[in-house]
Image (tube, grey):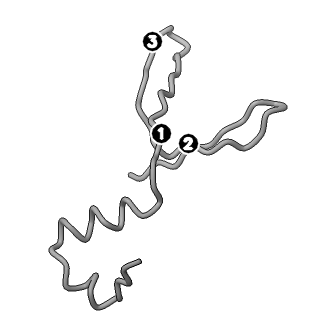
């Protein structure tokens, strides 16, 4: 196994460093979240930050950065 030091990471190219750090947590599933307004207007978006909270009642959460 290769050891990567903090100094090594600092010296990486900006885009390589960003891709490396973003991939550390591994595979992330894509989830479609849908809503419907009181005027019956549908909205669907893709989120990768969905977390299962419970099954009775069914609950999940997602993180959104603005």
Quadrant of the rendering where the N terminus is positioned:
bottom left
- SS label for mark 3: loop
On the image, numbered disc 3 is attached to which residue?
Answer: 41
Query: Which residue is nearer to you in this view: 55 or 3?
Result: 3
Query: Which residue is nearer to you in this view: 42 or 2?
Result: 2
The numbered mark at residue 53 is none
Position of residue 21 in the picture relative to residue 37 (left or right): left
The numbered mark at residue 50 is 2
- Residue shown at the point (35%, 67%) measured from the top left: 21
Q: Mark 3 or 1, which is nearer the eye?
A: 1
- Residue shown at the point (28%, 81%) measured from the top left: 9
Position of residue 49 in the picture relative to residue 58 (left or right): left
Tell me where residue 31 appears, x and y as whole percent: 49, 32
Q: How many marks?
A: 3
On the image, numbered disc 1 is attached to which residue?
Answer: 29
Tell me where residue 38 appears, x and y as whole percent: 55, 13
């Amino acid at each position: 196994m290769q050891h990567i030091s903090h100094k090594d990471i600092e010296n990486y190219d900006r885009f390589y460093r960003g891709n490396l750090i973003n991939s550390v947590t591994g595979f992330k599933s894509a989830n479609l979240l849908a809503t419907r307004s009181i005027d019956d207007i549908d909205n669907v978006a893709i989120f990768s930050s969905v977390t299962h909270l419970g099954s009775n009642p069914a609950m999940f959460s997602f993180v959104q950065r603005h």
